[in-house]
Image: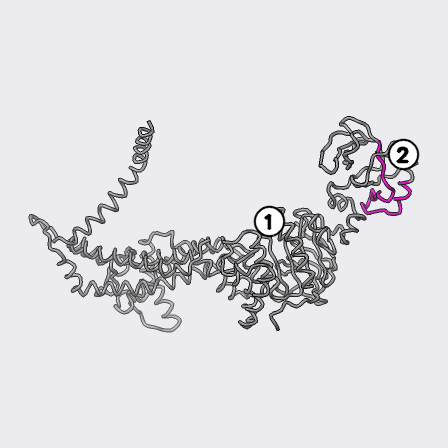
Amino acid sequence: MTGDLQPRTGKPIQLENVTRRWGEITAVDGVSIHIPEGSFTALLGPSGCGKSTTLRMIAGLENVSEGKVLIGGEDVTGRPCSKRDLSMVFQSYALFPHLSVAENIIFGLKVRRVGRSDRDARLAKVAGLLGLSDLLERKPGQLSGGQQQRVALGRAIIGEKLICLMDEPLSNLDAKLRHEMRVEIRALQKQLGFTMVYVTHDQVEAITMADQVVLLNAGRLEQAATPRDLYEKPATPFAARFVGTPPMNLFPARVFSRLANAPEHTLGIRPEAMHLEEGGPVSASVQALEYLGADILADCVIGGTPFQVRLPTTKSVVPGQSIDLGFETCALHVFDGQTGRRRDELVSEYGAQLRS
Amino acid sequence: MRGLIFRREWITGWLLLLPALVFLFAFTHIPAVTTILNSFFSTPRGRRQAKFIGLDNYERMIADPVFWKVLWNNLWFALGTIPVSVALAIIMALWVNEKLLGRSFVRMAYFTPTVLPLIAVANIWLFFYTPGFGLFDQITGTLFGWPATNYLGNPDTALNAIIVVTVWKEAGFFMIFYLAALQSIPVNLKEAAQIEGAGRWTIFRRITFPLLMPTTLFVCVNAVINSFRLVDHIFILTDGGPDNASALLLFYIYEVAFRFWETAYGATLTVALLILLSLLAISQFFFFDRKVHYK
């Protein structure tokens, strides 16, 4: 081995019907995901949805109640985490407080008895890459949050593992630093080429960083797709509401007078996809306005259903006013009233009816 | 005006301190100073007043074979009890920190010796050690066919028998401190080490044990002080005998001062004990200083 951090292609990870139960509680319920090698996959969901548990099952820190975990095609379900050959960054960083930055980073190499010269060369490389060269003698307690984060990253990448797991690594940083680290982690993953599984509850993080977003809700898989597909073609009303700020507006089909006889499906339109249009299909009354600078966010009501719409600042609207709104047919989403799944074949029909 | 307020605050401050000060001086500082002063005087007897005799008491102490004997005993006692009880405490704490069936029961069982009064405990152990039909003789007699042994009556074994009782008594007490320290170590440190491929022993050696160092320092200082302080069970088990084989320094001080009523010489021995204890405590702090990581 050399001191260089070689780019490498990671290993694929496969979850097959993975379930985790604690007594009566099912934290993860029959989740199947394929994580391609070298990809950046974000596990996204609200708190308590089972995303951290899923990550910990991949890591081997949590037992799998049912189902299989495969890494690089091998079944590792019963294997302890020390034998799974992966690295992990914890939310709290889990730095060893009594060891210096250098000792923290090379901990794994020492455990695996990597020779001193190789160790030092790799440490120098990683410290240079992460800008930690001047801090190697310090203890974690003497570092800022962002520096601690870098040390945790260093410990994860120095082993040149093919898989790196991250559990909400940026949630303890302030907004500016979070943005910087987001870019940095993404660049690092691209440069080194390992498979990344990244847990976050922040949809912006997931959308901006990941190749694939796995959306979980209440222990179940809602949708696994690219960020673009997740935004443009959400599979369920939950996915539609969870991704995008402000969230997608959902209406029972019957609030529209022109769809009064339709079955109980749910229609979705994003706030930014609607615009003012005289005689448009959506007649609503404005309740309140939020001035955002670039545009105005208007809280409106139609048939008792509240929704939001993004309007340009050039058009003046006032609370209490009635407005007509329109949208492109392709911006309409239809979700089945029974199963909650997406019904793309109904979009053009409903779009036409609303326009009629 | 400001001066007046300052004065009033000053008076209030001293009044608040007063109760604690009275007790500290009455029971700690004044007796300590008196002890040091007394060690330079002769013992007052009847009409004869105590008179200043300089270092005579100290010269007598250095020439006293019993003093050296009990000091040596005490050293052996400390060496026998401290490492064993601290090691046992760590092992027990690691064990009851794991998830296991009846964990709180095991924890309670380990802590019981600390709760029981030492006098009662010593009496129970007295039965265990009884030659012929005591617990130990019953076991060794049945298993190995050994003859009856008088562990407490033999100068070679008396001190060791007392060491066993002390270890049994102390380990559970120290375990509580280690258990508390173990529970304050975040679980994800262990997980991070596991992910890096560390086994149980490596995790203990490189993560857990170093993070327990502040507790180890605390426990060691206490263990050293206890090894010079515990005398109650000696009264019950051996009364210092045979031939001072199980007498410790404090026990000897008690004998000299309150059985033979040589209070001045007792004071001298007490001063020696105090100096010894302070030296030990200070040197422990220096020894551990570089190895202890405080959060």
Rounded to the nearest angstrom, the CA distance separating label 2 from label 1 is 49 Å
* Placement of B7 over or under A169, stated as above or below: above
| Chain to which mark 1 belongs | A
Q: Is residue B233 magenta?
A: no
Locate the N terminus of chain B by quadrant: top left
Q: Where does label 2 land, which residue?
A: A258
Q: Nearer the viewer, residue B295 or B97?
A: B295
In what element is the residue under mark 2? helix
Q: Which residues are magenta?
A: A324-351
Mark 2 vs 1: CB contact within 8 A = no
Q: Position of residue B224 (x, y in %)?
A: 33, 58
From the viewer's side, name the closer residue of A183 and B153: A183
Residue at the spot x=84%, y=32% of the render?
A324
Q: Is residue B154 left or right of residue A260?
A: left
Horizontal side, residue B284 vs residue A139: left or right: left
Question: Which residue type carries mark 2?
Answer: Arg
